[in-house]
Every structure is written in structure tokens, then in C-alpha cells.
Image (cartoon, helix red, strand yellow):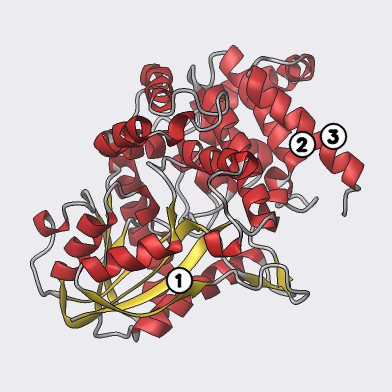
């Protein structure tokens, strides 16, 4: 189903208004009859994890599992404090353009990055899995290819370029709940250790590895990728990969240096990174460009977005020989491509609805209702608003080709 430009604009305006207000709407209140009939049954259920994709199966069952999940390491009464503390690190965002672009604001987030990123993923991990799947990243996509096919192709491409096989020992730097590393392990047979700063992600990811029957070859550990030398022995691994994760780093040179130290001589480091693209027209003095950049940062737990040149220089300064680098989305608007951001618009099907703007509006109404009824923890509405707002910024950045989440790099330890 294709929407007219007028309808898209209307949904856009509604979405922005709702994100700003964060209140229970009349439509949301009308949902309460449905909600009340399901509360006793839903809340009493224990969340059953399914590594094969069924944890958050459909819109309503998934919503209740998400919002009444008792497994989270973040207690219900701490959600509001956590989102308030997170938003404080981006004080002034979306209110005064350039406010979070100041040196003081960036340095504050760089200093508090560990708390910022850990808090962010305590808040959004289940939202991500519910709306996106177990692989928390975007992917270039060709026409005729499904969303999941594009995600896996993106992951397998890294494994192919790095030459991974059954005898390879690899690190996933910033692994989330481990979706990519499980796919790559099953594709290559490699032994993979994933690192994430977030305790909840380790818990969920290792449960999924066991369910997949690959726990002996694929595991997650909690740790700070700024301090990999405290986690891994030097000169131990053949390959390291990072998929849209090192954008959270406050100092890529320190992060990449830790990767370098963990690799054997000649070891390969491949990945995708989030960057703004001056070569695509990004202009830091352009107010609209800056608004998009800052919207992406505040909605994704980023100290500040780097340029592609910054990433390449950080690799070189960390002791790597950079073999190749390019924007994997360089053909984003080719007739043969489906833009990477198109999935944020979603499709009007049962499975795709939650990704559409209308779906996100309905989700936000449901979240408002459940928080009002004390089913969802206080503060959940703010998390929903944060993610809905940044989805719009990501789409705009992609449309203008001033941002890519898939800047590919391949480097070798000297």
C-alpha cells in the first residue's frame, strides 16, 4: 500500500505532535476497554524467549510482552529516573538547534558514555527486538529482497570479506543481543565472542545462543569495548567485526586500539559505522542538517556523529592498515535499490504495520494507555516518544543522503 504525499505529511505531523505532547489521547483512552479485558491474562504470563523470532510475535501479544516484561535488569520504578537521566545528557535537544553540538555538551556525553549507553539499552533493547528483530542494524537492500534477507546478507558480507570459517576465532564488538553473531556463526562455523556493555543484553543473548544449540561456539560477555584489553588476551583473535556499534564510542582510537591489540598480526577488522557524509552534502552550518544530526544522536545514545574521514583516521591511528572503505548505501536511490530507511516507513501488512508511521502512532497510543493503567512502568511513554522521533530523523537523513548507518571499512593489523 502506497500513501499519498499528503497522507504521509499528515501522519508525520501527527507523529511529531504526539512525541512532543506525550499525553494520553482520546483515542488512547478508547483503547482502555480492550486493554482492561486483557490485563489479568497478559500480566500474569511469564515472557517466553524464542531465539527463532517468536518472542514478540504480533502487534498486541508483542506489545504486552514488551511492556509487562519482568525479566529486565532495570526495575519498574527505575525506568523514569533512567530516561530522565538519559535525556539530561542531551539537554536542549530538539528545542535549540546546536545546543547539544557544543563542546561542553559533547564532552559531557563522552565522559558519561558508559552510563549513557548502558541506560539507553536498558530502556530500548526490548523495543528494538519487538520492532526490528534480533539484529539491531540497517542494511542495503535490493528490490525483490525481503528485509530479513537484506539483514543477513549484510552480515554474511562481513564474514566473507574477513575470510571467516570453522577455524576462525572472532570478536563481535558491541554485539547487542547477538543476532548478527549467531547468524554469522551458523553461516561460517566460527567461534565468536560478543561484547556488550549491557547486562540485560548478555542475559537475553546467551539464552538465545543456547536455544539455537550453538552455545559452545557463540557466547556474549559483559564488558566495555573501550577497555577490550581487560577482557581479551592480546594477539588471540583472527577477526573482529563491529556492526553499527562503535558509533557509541566516545573515543574510536581507544576502542579500535583495543581491537588491534586483541587480534593476531595480520588479523582483519571489518564493520559498518554510522557517519554523516560531507561528501554527500552534509553541512554542519546548515540548520536543517544539524537538526537531523542531533535528532539521530539523541534518539540513539550517541556522543556525536563522526564523519567517514574521522572513522578512517581513527583506524589508521590505532595501528591498522585500512584496506577498503566506502558507503554501502552509495546507491541508495538507484532504481534497483530499496532505500535502507524504507523499513522505517514499514508496509501495511500484519508483520510490517508496527514499523509504519501509523503503526508507531498506534504503539505510542497503546504505551500511553498502559502507562496510565500502571501496567507499563512510568517513563515508558518517554522512551516510545524518543524512538518515534528519531525514526523521522533517520528517514530524513537517508533521503537527503547526508547520513549513512552502513559505512563499510576493512582493515588489517600491521
Residues marked 3 and 1 touching at CB (< 8 Å) = no
Quarter of the figure with the C terminus: bottom left
Quarter-wise, where is residue 185 in the image?
A: bottom left
Distance in Å between CA atoms under marks 2 and 3: 5 Å
When the figure is inspected, residue 185 is found, relative to residue 255, above or below; the finding is: below
Reading the image, the residue beneath label 3 is: 10
Q: Is residue 179 left or right of residue 349?
A: left
- Most extreme residue toward the front is 285
The disc, 3 or 1, on the residue closer to the chain's N-terminal end is 3
Distance in Å between CA atoms under marks 3 and 1: 35 Å
When the figure is inspected, residue 24 is found, relative to residue 235, above or below; the finding is: above
Horizontal and vertical percent for residue 52?
Answer: 50, 60
Reading the image, the residue beneath label 2 is: 12
Q: Residue at 67% x, 48% y: name it.
A: 396
When the figure is inspected, residue 205 is found, relative to residue 290, above or below; the finding is: below
Q: Residue at 66% x, 36% y: name it.
A: 60
Residues marked 1 and 2 touching at CB (< 8 Å) = no
Q: Would you call the spot at circle 3 few (<14 residues within 10 Å), some (14-19), or many (20 or more)?
A: few
Q: Would you call the spot at circle 2 few (<14 residues within 10 Å), some (14-19), or many (20 or more)?
A: some
Q: Is residue 139 left or right of residue 215?
A: right
Residues marked 2 and 3 touching at CB (< 8 Å) = yes
Q: Secondary structure at mark 2?
A: helix
Horizontal and vertical percent for residue 160?
Answer: 42, 84
Q: Secondary structure at mark 3?
A: helix
Distance in Å between CA atoms under marks 1 and 2: 31 Å
- Residue 408 is tagged as 1
The disc, 1 or 2, on the residue closer to the chain's N-terminal end is 2
Q: Nearer the viewer, residue 238 or 303?
A: 303
Amino acid at each position: 500500500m502506497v500513501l499519498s504525499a499528503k497522507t504521509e505529511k499528515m501522519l508525520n505531523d501527527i507523529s511529531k505532535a504526539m512525541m512532543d505532547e506525550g499525553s494520553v489521547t482520546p483515542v488512547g483512552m478508547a483503547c482502555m476497554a480492550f486493554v482492561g479485558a486483557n490485563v489479568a491474562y497478559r500480566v500474569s504470563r511469564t515472557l517466553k524467549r524464542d531465539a527463532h523470532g517468536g518472542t514478540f510475535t504480533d502487534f498486541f501479544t508483542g506489545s504486552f510482552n514488551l511492556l509487562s516484561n519482568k525479566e529486565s535488569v532495570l526495575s519498574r520504578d527505575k525506568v523514569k529516573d533512567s530516561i530522565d537521566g538519559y535525556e539530561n545528557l542531551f539537554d536542549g535537544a530538539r528545542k535549540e538547534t546546536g545546543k547539544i553540538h557544543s563542546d561542553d555538551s559533547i564532552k559531557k556525553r563522552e565522559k558519561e558514555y558508559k552510563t549513557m549507553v548502558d541506560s539507553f539499552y536498558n530502556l530500548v533493547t526490548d523495543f528494538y527486538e519487538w520492532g526490528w528483530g534480533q539484529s539491531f542494524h540497517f542494511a542495503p537492500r535490493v528490490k525483490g529482497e525481503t528485509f530479513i534477507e537484506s539483514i543477513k546478507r549484510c552480515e554474511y558480507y562481513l564474514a566473507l570479506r574477513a575470510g571467516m570459517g570453522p577455524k576462525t576465532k572472532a570478536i563481535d564488538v558491541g554485539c547487542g543481543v547477538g543476532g548478527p553473531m549467531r547468524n554469522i556463526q551458523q553461516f561460517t562455523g566460527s567461534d565468536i565472542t560478543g561484547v556488550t556493555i549491557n547486562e540485560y543484553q548478555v542475559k537475553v543473548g546467551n539464552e538465545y545462543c543456547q536455544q539455537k544449540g550453538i552455545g559452545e561456539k557463540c557466547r556474549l560477555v559483559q564488558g566495555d569495548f573501550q577497555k577490550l584489553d581487560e577482557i581479551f588476551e592480546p594477539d588471540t583473535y583472527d577477526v573482529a567485526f563491529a556492526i553499527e556499534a562503535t558509533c557509541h564510542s566516545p573515543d574510536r582510537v581507544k576502542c579500535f586500539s583495543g581491537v588491534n591489540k586483541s587480534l593476531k598480526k595480520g588479523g582483519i577488522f571489518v564493520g559498518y559505522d554510522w557517519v554523516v557524509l560531507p561528501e554527500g552534502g552534509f553541512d554542519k552550518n546548515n540548520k536543517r542538517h544539524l537538526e537531523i544530526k542531533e535528532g539521530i544522536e539523541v534518539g540513539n545514545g550517541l556522543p556525536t556523529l563522526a564523519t567517514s574521514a574521522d572513522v578512517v583516521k581513527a583506524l589508521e591511528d590505532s595501528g591498522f592498515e585500512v584496506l577498503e572503505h566506502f558507503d554501502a548505501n552509495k546507491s541508495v536511490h538507484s532504481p534497483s535499490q530499496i532505500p535502507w530507511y524504507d523499513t522505517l516507513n514499514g508496509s501495511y501488512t500484519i508483520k510490517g504495520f508496527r514499523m509504519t508511521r501509523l503503526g508507531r502512532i498506534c504503539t505510542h497510543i497503546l504505551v500511553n494507555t498502559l502507562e496510565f493503567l500502571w501496567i507499563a512502568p512510568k517513563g515508558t511513554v518517554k522512551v516510545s516518544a524518543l524512538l518515534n522521533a528519531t525514526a523521522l530523523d533517520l528517514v530524513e537523513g537517508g533521503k537527503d543522503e547526508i547520513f549513512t548507518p552502513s559505512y563499510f571499512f576493512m582493515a588489517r593489523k600491521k
